[in-house]
Image: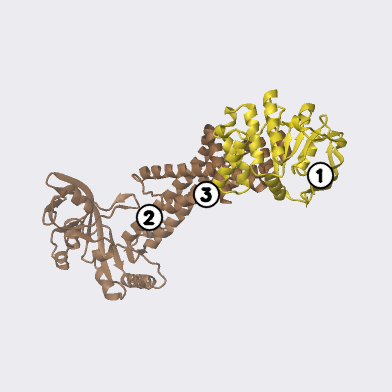
Amino acid sequence: MALILLKNIYKIYNVGGEEVRALDGVNLEIKDNEYLAIMGPSGSGKSTLMNMVGCLDTPTSGIYEFEGEMVQVMDDSQLASIRNRKIGFVFQTFNLLPKATAQHNVEIPLIYANIRKDKRKEMASEALSSVGLSDRSHHRPNELSGGQRQRVAIARALVNNPSIILADEPTGNLDSKSGEEIMKILDDLHNRGNTIILVTHEDDIAQHANRIIRLLDGKIIEDLYIEKNDSFIC
Amino acid sequence: MILLFVENFKISLSAVFANKTRSILTALGIIIGILSVTLMGTLISGLDKSFESSMSWLGKDILYVSRYEWFSDMEWWEVRNRPRMLPEYVNKIKEKSQYALAVAPVMQRGASLSFEDKSTRTEIFGTNEEYMETISTNIATGRFFTKNEDRSGSRVTVIGEGIREAFFGDKDPVGKYIKIDDIKFRVIGVLEKQGKFLGLFSVDKQAILPFGAYKRIFSKRGWMRLSVKVPDDKLEDGLDEIISVMRHIRGLKPNEKNDFAINQTKAFEKQYKALKIAIGGTGIFITLLSLVVGGIGIMNIMFVSVKERTREIGVRKAIGATKGMIMGQFLMEAVTICLFAGSVGILLAYIFSFFINKFFPSELPIFLSLVAMFMSIVVGVISGFIPSYRASKLDPIDSLRYE
């Protein structure tokens, strides 16, 4: 069964009396444990598509099914609940809360999921150690390097065992070495069975995925599956 | 739910502490508001208390028969020709009235008291042996004078606690002689401490003399009133009866107006209530205005806080916060500032009322501090509502892009 199914999705904005089609009839099916990269120039609609898939936005028309549930008819709290339990976001600018420790940042989704404190601590520690940051759990974001911050953000995205991880230019603000580390973590997550959607405009980052979608003017112009040999992954 | 509540409280604490100066300045408005509201309430409740105790000193069941009304809008020429009260009215009232339980004539004047090398000026009262029944105070030590002592003009006196303290200190005053305007009187008893009447003047500095001796030595005529005690379940009947008894004594025809006044604590109560509504009403209104100003300050700073944290709101929404959760977080922040400010305001009110109490009766009741606490929460909710609502409505995508 498809994890995500987009059927004939349109997103139309009205900017100064002019119609802007951010998504213009997108059809897309994403299966469990796919590693998908969405590519395209700026203004191609890739951010809109990602927001749509991440349930931050609803389509003007079309059908969006997430694990068989109709997303386009959901109200605010249902969308929030899906985002909380099923989706993990990783942003280009990390978007950690500056005053909270790494540990607490990772705990926030669990608080919204109403999980008990001891259980919460345990899950957050586990997520932090899976990105190799156990020893940094009580540091605040400004005491961490960019790569470490992004790893905290990944831990936050992972902590609720979501169905998909949505990474929007996860290496955009990092040096190449830190970027490689982050990509390695995402690769590992994929190998462990997670579904990952990556938005990027860098070809070598997109090469980590096993399926690449190219967007232009709100339309999918290319949908490419990449065959990989095992040595590349290792 | 509780989890989220605790979490929101923690968030708001950290937000409040992160901007200490701003929080304190914002809180100041509420602190002043709560302080003035509670102080106002404190003063009114202090006034109430002292009024109550002063009224109980006067006694609800006592009718004060006298030449003039305590509070009257009559012109002076209407009352100035009224006849004086006379000592013989005491027996006439006793004869004709069935409700009068005790009748005491009371004459009053200033006099100087002295004992050994100490002296003071005070009020002296001339009355009969039934006087004790018309006041609510008891004898602390010794005894009151008897009917015989009154009739025979014995030079004995019952002094107030204030005089005892000033003249005798730790010594027993009973049996000692004090001089009242250079005439020797033997102290036979001391009244209990009573405190201040309406917080204005002390009633403990007084000396009570038998009517016989008072008349002979100090004044045959002079101003006089009668205190008549009636059963407290028959106040209205007693009042009607005493009016008709007095009219009979004065020989008034049915079409003539009363040429005397019968005062009751009710008259005080009426005056007091009007005063209380005037002072309390305007006072509370003005102080509430200051609380409103404080609330506007909170609203203002909450708008700033929401604006500053737009991105945080976006992140929180992206990772699963609902509108309600965001709203709760910012409401909690406003309430936290107000609760903090409210506590400080109440604390200051306690300290202030402690000092004011030295000059004027004031006491901060627990009930009032609870009301003030509740009020600060309400102010927090009201002034935080619109900013929080706006925060909850923010679009997560736009918020995440906000710089």
Question: Is disc 2 on the same chain as disc 1?
Answer: no
Q: Nearer the viewer, mark 2 or mark 3?
A: 3
- Give the chain letter for brown: B
The amino acid at mark 2 is: Lys
Which chain letter goes with mark 1? A
- Residue visible at 46% across and 44% down in the picture: B343
**Chain where mark 2 sits:** B
Residue shown at the point (13%, 50%) measured from the top left: B182
Decide: few, some or many residues near mark 2? Use Cα within 10 Å; few <14, some 14-19, many ≥20. some
**Which disc, if any, is residue A59?**
1
Rate crowding at label 1 as few (under 14), some (14 to 19) or many (20 or more) other CA atoms within 10 Å: many
The residue lying at 65 percent from left, 31 percent from top is A150
Q: Which residue is mark 2?
A: B49
Q: Position of residue B265 (x, y in %)?
A: 37, 61
Q: Which chain's residue wears label 3?
A: B
Kindly identify which residue carries mark 3: B375
The residue shown at (60%, 47%) is B382
What is the three-letter code of the residue carrying label 1? Pro
SS of the residue under disc 3:
helix
Chain A color in figure: yellow
Residue type for callout 3 = Met
Residue A171: quarter of image:
top right
| CA gap, disc 1 and disc 2 | 68 Å
